[in-house]
Image (cartoon, rainbow, N blue to C red):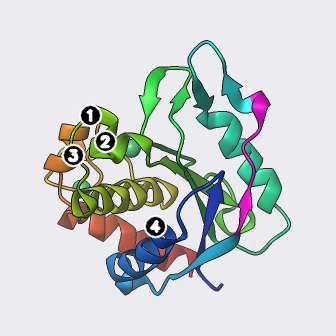
Amino acid sequence: MKKNITLLRIGQVDQSILDKLKKELELSFINFKLSIDPLKEIISLEPSEYNTNRLQYNASKILNRIINYELNKKSFRILGIIDEDIFTNSLNFVFGLAMSPKGKLSKKLVVALISITRLREKFYRRAENKKIFELRVLKEAIHELGHTFNLGHCKNFCIMRFSNSLADTDKKSSKFCDVCLKKLQDYFNKIK
Ligand SMILES: [Zn+2]
Ligand SMILES: [Zn+2]
């Protein structure tokens, strides 16, 4: 099975963010021979996914739409990227959301979504810092993809540490700890 991760924009997201992510994700998952494919196409934001009381988009609804959108295309994983604030029913906001693979792994499309809005210093009325922003985007992307490879949250100094605030994201490692790396290796060996 060819293992490609499609990067899919939901609404307007700068192409340069995808290009940067492609390079960095290929490096992060270098042991697993993943190819990262940024799509030129942008899928539109849907008014039905916007909650007018919360002024946020519903992450679960978007995740489901990504699944339906891509159902007939050939992707190993899809990572949706949105530049709008997103929530789930249990959390005020989320940096990202992912499905865990269940059942017949190779037959089911597994998707993840990240929002880059709250990763900008600007969101907190601080001066923009491109380097920090890009590192945060990468961390969230690796973390959510980790979930799609069956990893849960981890208490080590590790990219799979749960982050509920930007400070958590900044504090955690941008890499998998040894325990998670071993689990990843086992997972990829299993689905070969
Ligand atoms: Zn998580
Ligand atoms: Zn870990």
Q: What whole-number distance in Å separates the C-alpha atoms at marks 1 and 4?
A: 21 Å
Earlier along the polypeptide chain: callout 4 or callout 3?
4
Helix, strand or loop under label 3? loop
Q: Position of residue 79 (x, y in %)?
A: 57, 60
Determine whether, in the image, residue 116 is placed left or right of residue 63.
left
Helix, strand or loop under label 4? helix
- The 10 Å Cα crowd at callout 4, few under 14, some 14 to 19, many 20 or more, is some
Tell me what residue is drawn at x 20 percent, y 63 percent. Answer: 177
Work out which quarter of the rendered image holds the C terminus and state it.
Answer: bottom right
Q: Is residue 115 above or below residue 40?
A: above
For ligand 2, the image quadrant comes to bottom left
Q: Mark 4: which amino acid?
A: Ile
Determine which of the numbered discs, if any, sits on residue 127 in the image: 3
Tell me what residue is drawn at x 22 percent, y 57 percent. Answer: 132
Q: Is residue 103 above or below residue 24?
A: above
Q: Mark 1: which amino acid?
A: Arg
- Corner quadrant of residue 158: bottom left
Q: Are marks 4 and 3 in contact (CB under 8 Å)?
A: no
Q: Is residue 43 magenta?
A: yes
Q: Position of residue 90 (x, y in %)?
A: 50, 20
Residue at the right extreme of this rendering? 72
Q: What whole-number distance in Å separates the C-alpha atoms at marks 2 and 4?
A: 16 Å
Residue with the mark numbered 4? 17
Determine which of the numbered discs, if any, sits on residue 125 in the image: 1
Residue with the mark numbered 2? 122
